[in-house]
Amino acid sequence: MGNNQSRRNFLAQVTGVTAGLAVALSGSEAQRILGANDGVVAGVIGYGEMGTENMESFLKHPGVEIGAVCDVYQPRLDKGIQDAGGRAKAYKDFRQVLDDKDIDVVIIATPDNWHALQMVMACQAGKDVYVEKPISTTLEEAKLMVEAARKHNRITQVGTWQRSGIHFQKAVQAVQDGIIGPVRFARTWNYRNFSPEGFGNPPDSDPLPGLDWDMWLGPAPKRPFNRNRCGIGNKWGTFRYFWDYAGGWMTDWGIHLLDVVLWAMKADGPRVITAAGGKYSIKDNRETPDTLQVTYEFPDFVCTYEMREINSNSMYGKDFGIEFHGTDGTLFLDRDGFEVFPEKWEFEPKPVERTASMKMESVNDALYDHVTNFLDSIKSRKRALCDIEVGQRSSNICFLANIAYRSKDRLIWDAANQHLTQGSPQAQKLLGREYRAPWTLTV
């Protein structure tokens, strides 16, 4: 079965994992103490579900103060001010947060159509930035975000927080150490059943009371208000299912899964991208597909992403996950933990030592540790774990999947330079988007 000594070492590592976790967790505790005397004033832009979670994680860190909350919907703004302890400034225009000299850091948790512009302007204003994934809606926006961070020397962290999860780190290390042998196939997936009605078909209407709909749209095209387009009041954040604002499950969930594949495989991106699917069964007013199959061809392995919202039957009893298939075994990974299964061979010249199945459960608050890493990077001025360039690569392969789906093209990608080398005029057009006046994106 390959290298038996490596396998024995890994078994010892897994069976002795409690001690390793104690060290890791005590390290996090030390970081909390070290950060106690270093004050950081943060401004939160967008106070929906992720804005709430992010604020909570930042406030768990000693020395962090929420100095401002911004939202275009008054009830959310009111709640954000209350959750911040009642002392934060309330803004409805994010530019007021950027103009506030008391704010050191901005946390961007708005819908995806705003991420690029707000992040670039925050860098120009001299703020460090924590920005939610995906970092933008297009590859061209993502490129400008990296340029802005470098030009203005800002510390950035993208909300792909699984990279701060201890069990994710150990699973990735296991793959990189060759415990399951060379990996030639990786699978990622999201499954659920929302058919046939999905999110329904609400009619266009007047905006919700207290909502600045024009500001919510921002650089996106002018559209009538629709409850599903906006997503406020719906825990699923239904704005994600309209191309003007996001990229469906592909960019919402796929980025978390594919980011881990890039990390574990030390890959910048695929060479070839193809996609197939459609909106086959769900009858709501979404624009993104209810079924999608994406194939990524890398130089020495293949990766797939599958999503369906019309059938929830799944592997391992999990509605999402990541599999790494190596010549010596398979590693399954999700947010609950990971498990390794040894391979069975059809032909063996002699008996081969095998390991038992190995399992590790999730143990740490990865989002908390992700914020810790960001705050430490602000102090050291060294790039954070999920610097904007890491987020660019993980976002881009999701954008490429949607471009392949929408254009029906076989795309050829230069991963080293993050550049599309083959694609139809329709595919090329989808690399960017036009901004609605008066908004412009310049570094």
Image (tube, rainbow, N blue to C red):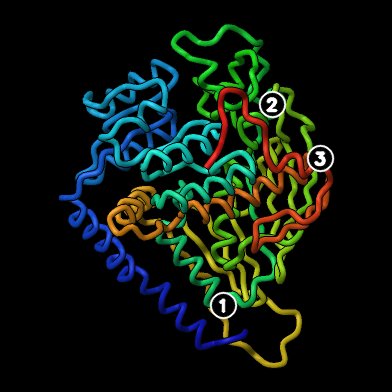
Q: Check disc 3 and report the residue beneath it.
A: 426
Q: Amino acid at mark 2?
A: Arg
Residue in the foreground of this view, choosing between 384 and 50: 384
Is any part of residue 171 visible from this angle? yes
Residue in the foreground of this view, choosing between 440 and 74: 440
Question: Residue drawn 53% across and 16% down?
Answer: 213
Query: Residue 195, relative to residue 159: is it above or below?
Result: above
Along the horizontal axis of the image, is 360 left or right of 26?
Answer: right
Query: Residue 423, relative to residue 107: is it above or below?
Result: below
Of circles 2 and 3, which is in front? Answer: 3
SS state under label 2: loop
Earlier residue among tags 2 and 3 = 2
- How far is mark 3 from mark 1, CA to CA? 41 Å
Residue 286, numbered circle: 2
Earlier residue among tags 2 and 1 = 1
- The N terminus lies in which quarter of the figure? bottom right
Residue 178, numbered circle: 1
Q: Position of residue 27 (x, y in %)?
A: 26, 63
Residue in the foreground of this view, choosing between 64 and 14: 64
SS state under label 1: loop
Please tell me how crowded label 1 is: few (under 14), some (14-19), or many (20+) other residues with Cα within 10 Å.
some
